[in-house]
Structure formats: C-alpha cells, structure tokens
Image: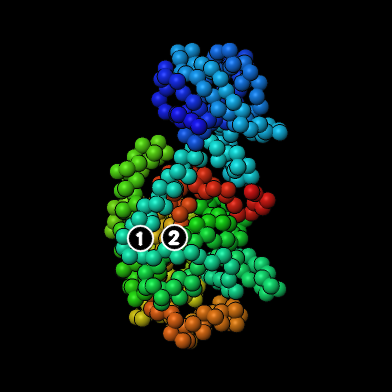
Amino acid sequence: MRTHYLMEPGSSSKVRLLVWLVKKDLGRGIVVLRDPSGLKEVRLVGGRAGDLLKLPCESLVVIEGCYSVDGLLVESYRVLHKPIEEPGIDYTVLPSDVRVLAKYSPWYMKHPLWMKIIRLQHITLYYIREFLYSRGFLELLSPMVSVAGDPGLRGARKLHTKLYGVDYELTSSVIMYKQVSAGIFEKIFFVARNVREEPSENISTGRHLVEFTQIDIEWALASLDDVIKLAEDLLEYVTRKLIVEHSDLVYSLNKEFEPLKPPFKKIRYTEALEIAKKLGYSVEWGEELSHEAEASVANYFSEPLWITHFPVISRGFYYLPEPSDPRYNMDFNLILPKGYGEVIDGGVREYRLEEVRKRIIALGEPIEKYSWFLDTIKKGGVPPSAGWGLGLERLTRYIAGVEHIVLATLFPKLPGLPKTP
C-alpha cells in the first residue's frame, strides 16, 4: 500500500504514504504524521490539502503526492479509518512523570524515542537468542502459573489465582522449572515473563517492574565459573553486535555507550559490605545491599561488577552453600555501573533433597506446596546445575541510557501504580 516511509529521504518523485494524522496547525497547513518509522512534521500543499486537514487526529490515511520545496503536495488521499473521538494526548512530547507514561503508555509508546528503544530491545533479544543457540542451548516455553513459585523475591509479593478451585501462583520465577528441564535437555533457556508485586517505593529506583522479562538459563553439571563466563560472553557478543550492525540506532539513543568487555571485576559479598560502609552506607551482615549502596559499590569500580557468595539467610532455597563455609551461597549478582544496578542473578543450585527441604522450612514456606518439586528431586529428576536470569528490560535501559525502565518496557506495570493498561 505504501511506497515510502516518512523518515526516508524526501525527493521530488511520487510517494504513497500510509500514515496517521497526529497533530495539525490549520493556520499554517502543517501536520505531524506518524508511521512505524517515526513522526514527521510536514506542510501540506495542493488542492486536497485543505480537506485532509479537516480530518480528526489519529485518522489513518493513504496520501499520494510528491515532496516539493513548499512541502508535501497532496494529489489524492483515502481515509482507511477515523476515530470516534480524538485522543486529547499530545504524544509528540514525553512527560517527565513516569506515572503518566505508564498510565497512558498506549499513546506515549508512539513517541519516536520509545519506539526506538523497543526496536533496540527487539534486536537485543534477537542477538541473545542467536548467542545461546550457538552455544547449544534449547529454548523452552515457560509456564504462566504454578502451585508454588520462588519464595526468595527479596521484598516482593507473589500474586495468586484460582484454578479449578485450587490456589495457584502467577509465575514470579521459573527457577524450579529450569532445574527440572536441565535434567532433560542439559542446556536450556526461557524468555520468561514474570509477575511480582513490588513494594510501592521501588517505583523510584528506575529499574523495578511488576511485570518483566527474564532470560533464564540453566546448565546441568555446570560450575559457578562456567555460568559466569557464559554470561560475560553473551553480554560481550550482544553489545558488540549492536555496535557493529546497529550503531546508528544505539548512538542515537546513547552517545556514550561502549560494548561490554569482560572479564568483569569480582568481589564477595563481605568485601562489598566493607566498601559500602566505607562509602557511608550502613548494612548489617546478612542483609541485602540497598539499591543506593549497590549502585555506589559498582560506581566505586566504574565497571560491571560481580558480587558473589551472598549469605544463605538472605536468599531463596535453590542455591548450593559453599563447601568451605556453608554460611554463604555459591551465587552471584552482576551490577551495572552508573546507577543501573543489578542485571543478572544466579548461581549453583541446591539439588539435595534434605537440604532443599530444610531451606524451604527455614523460609517459612509450607512444605506441601513444593511436593511436586521435592518428589522430582527424590526420584532423580533434578541434577546438579547452575544458571542465571538476565533482566531484558534492565539491559535495554542500560544500552539505551535512559533514566527509568518505564521507557524500556511495552505497556509498563510500575510498582505501586495499579490500573495501568
């Protein structure tokens, strides 16, 4: 139906555009038009221009004509769709309030910046899949509900539903499904959609969502170093490919972006605690670092930072304790610099039946909820494994260099903000 997109270079040759009418200035005959390539302000000229200007905003039209020094000469047009009511939202300008962006995301996502970031996310996910496929990982489809999800959500709350009168949880993590799947295929990953009710105050961190996407990998018989190296290789591959093949897109969003170059610095939780205290943050042993303390520790090194070996009491039941000091897990977080925070969480998995039982009970969880998983372990269905989850929206936010994750998310659900689309 169209011969050209709006953002293609104009010429005097004829064009057929398929566009939405976004905004108009009747006095000057100027309109803002939109198509998948972005927004463009043009002056409409010619005999049919006046009639086209009478259409309501968000009309979808086919325009035939040509570009001239005076503007777009409209030779003919055809209306494909007209709104019953104009939206009344000027999405050519993004408001600074993230609550407004989330509430009216179906409109503000039409802004060129938001559109570019979502295109960047699409390409990033493509390269993530490309890399994992090349390393022999099998992509699986993740479940949406479970009789029991991850109890180690660090302040977030699981959401519940009913299925045939039985209590189920919406997927907050695919951790147990990953471990079982690794016992079948050995190397697997999910592009998993997760839902968690985050504390309302987390809207201000810039990196928390209620509904988010996680690249969840699991690797049977892998070590801590194996999966850390895999994550570093993936991030190097993806960010290098983005610059090699899509530098115009990346640099139009973030002029300071540089491909990630591992290996990244590694410190243990105890060392991170000492640095945080030196930087003025009070954190007791066994507690999570606050978002501010975590960001300051990462900035102290000015590069992506692995924090490893968190206390057993601070995390979920699925990490294997360190043999030399069982107070600590064999786990890790990758923290991005410049305040972007945690982007990867993972470690070596606990797979021993009695130890898993003890950890679930210690977390105050009803043991019967996890009967399917415990029975699978008992009968040899859960092997030793290691893995991690990478937040896709968080990685997109970092690459695009935007302050808040709202712009790195389609139809964002933000902490403490109900009734958003």
Q: Which residue is mark 2?
A: 215
Q: Of the residues under marks 2 and 1, which one precedes in the sequence? A: 1
For label 1, the residue is: 132
Q: Amino acid at mark 1?
A: Leu
- Mark 2, secondary structure of its residue: strand
Residues at badges 2 and 1 in contact (C-beta under 8 Å)? yes
Q: Nearer the viewer, residue 148 or 14?
A: 14
Q: Position of residue 3 (x, y in %)?
A: 45, 29
Residue 1 percent location from the top left of the image: 50, 32
Above or below for 369 versus 143? below
C-alpha gap between disc 2 and disc 1: 10 Å
Total marks drawn?
2
Residue in view at x 40 percent, y 79 percent: 383
Quadrant hosting residue 89 = top right
Q: Residue at x 46, y 57 (%)?
A: 391
**Residue drawn at 56 percent across, 77 percent down:** 363
Tell me if I can see residue 75 in this picture.
Answer: yes
Using the rendered view, name the quadrant where residue 157 is placed: bottom right
